[in-house]
């Protein structure tokens, strides 16, 4: 049987890593993983609805269906529209109003119906790249999404021109308002 001399055997033996070395490796791995996840969360773009008005920080909403509510300036009755978010556009699916009068639509893709709440429902199915609103407390411009109300007239001064559009933003952009 062939053997190495003892002096060579002791110098070539493999030592097992100490507990301290293993703990340090685990800490480095965990720290790196946490940093990678945080970078991903803060820098990965996500599709959102952006509300933008000159002189104001941008506001962001999830890219989910929402309702746009207001009081009609002539009829003085509530109107609202339902918008779904498609890839890069808003799809106006339904329009609801209480009374007929000046400026009230008269064509619907299906037979208009009256809801239990007394609104006339028109099916519309029109697509918009962006929505342009003039916010006013007089008409109580409000967005409702997932049963949460966003009274735009509380966020912006009267007659503020507001653009609502679909954008890809990072969490960092949403936190900083840009």
Image (cartoon, rainbow, N blue to C red):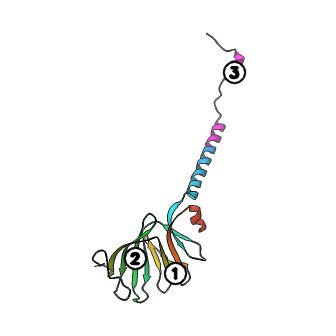
Q: In this view, does 162 lie to the left or right of 125?
A: right
Q: From the viewer's perspective, is the residue at label 2 or at label 3 nearer? A: 2
Highlighted range, magenta: 1-26
Evaluate if marks 2 and 3 touch, with contact meaning CB atoms under 8 Å apart.
no
Q: In this view, does 77 lie to the left or right of 109?
A: right
Q: Which of marks 1 and 3 is nearer the N terminus?
A: 3
Residue 48: in magenta span: no
**Disc 3, SS:** helix
**Of residues 6 and 62, which is closer to you in this image?**
62
**Residue 120, image x and y in percent?**
32, 81
C-alpha separation, residue under disc 2 versus residue under disc 3: 82 Å
The numbered mark at residue 72 is: none
In the picture shown, does residue 22 fall above or below 132?
above
**Disc 2, SS:** strand
Hey, which quadrant is residue 115 in on the image? bottom left
**Disc 1, SS:** helix
Q: Name the residue under label 1.
A: 153
Q: Look at 56% across and 65% down and name the residue there.
A: 174
The numbered mark at residue 81 is: 2
C-alpha separation, residue under disc 2 versus residue under disc 1: 17 Å
Q: How crowded is mark 2: few (under 14 residues within 10 Å), some or many (20 or more)?
A: many
Q: Earlier in the sequence, mark 2 or mark 1?
A: 2
**Residue 8, image x and y in percent?**
70, 18
**Residue 16, image x and y in percent?**
63, 30
In the picture shown, does residue 177 fall above or below 132?
above
């Amino acid at each position: 049987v062939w053997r190495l001399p003892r002096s060579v055997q002791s110098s070539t033996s493999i030592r097992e890593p100490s507990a301290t070395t293993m703990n340090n490796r685990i800490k480095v791995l965990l720290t790196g993983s946490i940093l990678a996840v945080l970078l991903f969360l803060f820098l990965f773009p996500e599709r959102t609805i952006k509300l933008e008005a000159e002189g104001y920080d941008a506001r962001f909403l999830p890219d989910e269906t929402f309702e746009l509510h207001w009081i009609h300036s002539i009829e003085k009755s509530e109107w609202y529209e339902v918008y779904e978010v498609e890839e890069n556009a808003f799809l106006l699916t339904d329009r609801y109003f209480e009374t007929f009068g000046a400026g009230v639509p008269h064509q619907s893709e299906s037979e208009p119906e009256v809801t239990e709440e007394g609104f006339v429902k028109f099916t519309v199915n029109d697509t918009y790249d962006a929505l342009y609103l003039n916010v006013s407390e007089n008409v109580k411009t409000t967005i409702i999404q997932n049963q949460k109300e966003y009274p735009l007239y509380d966020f912006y001064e009267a007659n503020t021109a507001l653009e609502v559009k679909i954008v890809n933003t990072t969490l960092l952009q949403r936190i900083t308002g840009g």
